[in-house]
Image (cartoon, rainbow, N blue to C red):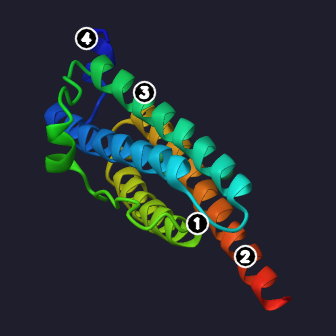
């Protein structure tokens, strides 16, 4: 990014880049949790669940890319090694040790709820200081809200199916 582009950021660049790298670490862990979850999933409505998990994995990867591009634009260095994902993550990683679709969905719902909180807080912290990054974060936040909704809708359908048996 050019000098003027950096100058208009009304906060410490290093502070902003750290926030973005923490989010980037979350996105990679979320990506893998969805991706591997889709591979091992077992149980009712598996096809639908797997399709949703795969779709969300692709979205998390896209988020990782958006964050990385912005970090580089700001003159920062994106996280260069997976070991740092664990050091920087806000939301952690839930291994899909139980492949039951319902357990996977609950784990991923928890992850989305954490992501929503993280991005909401980040947006509040930067909205008056960096409009360009705010727009990116808002776009990601919109996706995470949709992710939570999609997963909860599947759980609701499963519960209804179980009731109507
Ligand atoms: Fe994401
Ligand atoms: Fe998500
Ligand atoms: Mg979806």
Rate crowding at label 1 as few (under 14), some (14 to 19) or many (20 or more) other CA atoms within 10 Å. many
Mark 2 vs 1, N-terminal side: 1
153 lies above or below 86: below
Q: Give the mark toward the camera: 1 or 3.
A: 1
Mark 2 vs 3, N-terminal side: 3
Q: Is residue 123 left or right of residue 51?
A: left
Q: Position of residue 86 (x, y in %)?
A: 19, 49
Residue labelled with disc 4? 3
Q: In the rendered image, which quarter contains the N terminus?
A: top left
Q: Is residue 141 visible in the rendered structure shown here? A: no
* Mark carried by residue 158: 2
Q: Position of residue 42 (x, y in %)?
A: 59, 62
Q: Is mark 4 within 8 Å of ligand 1?
A: no
What residue is shown at x 13% (from left), y 48% (from top)?
Answer: 87
* Mark carried by residue 65: 3
Q: Give the mark toward the camera: 3 or 4.
A: 3
Q: CA distance from mark 2 to mark 3?
A: 33 Å
Q: CA distance from mark 3 to mark 4?
A: 23 Å
Do callouts 2 and 1 mark residues in contact (Cβ within 8 Å)? yes
Residue labelled with disc 1? 101
């Amino acid at each position: 990014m050019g000098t003027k582009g950096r100058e208009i950021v009304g906060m410490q660049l290093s502070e902003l880049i750290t926030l973005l790298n923490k989010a980037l670490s979350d996105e990679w862990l979320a990506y893998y949790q969805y991706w591997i979850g889709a591979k091992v999933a077992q149980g009712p409505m598996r096809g639908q669940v797997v399709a949703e998990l795969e779709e969300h994995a692709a979205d998390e990867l896209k988020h990782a890319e958006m964050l990385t591009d912005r970090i580089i634009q700001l003159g920062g260095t994106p996280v260069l090694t997976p070991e740092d994902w664990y050091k920087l993550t806000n939301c952690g990683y839930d291994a899909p040790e139980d492949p039951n679709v319902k357990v996977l969905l609950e784990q991923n719902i928890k992850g989305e709820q954490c992501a929503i909180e993280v991005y909401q807080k980040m947006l509040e912290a930067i909205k008056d200081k960096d409009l360009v990054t705010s727009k990116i974060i808002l776009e990601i936040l919109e996706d995470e809200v949709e992710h939570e909704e999609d997963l909860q809708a599947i759980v609701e359908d499963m519960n209804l199916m179980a009731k109507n048996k």
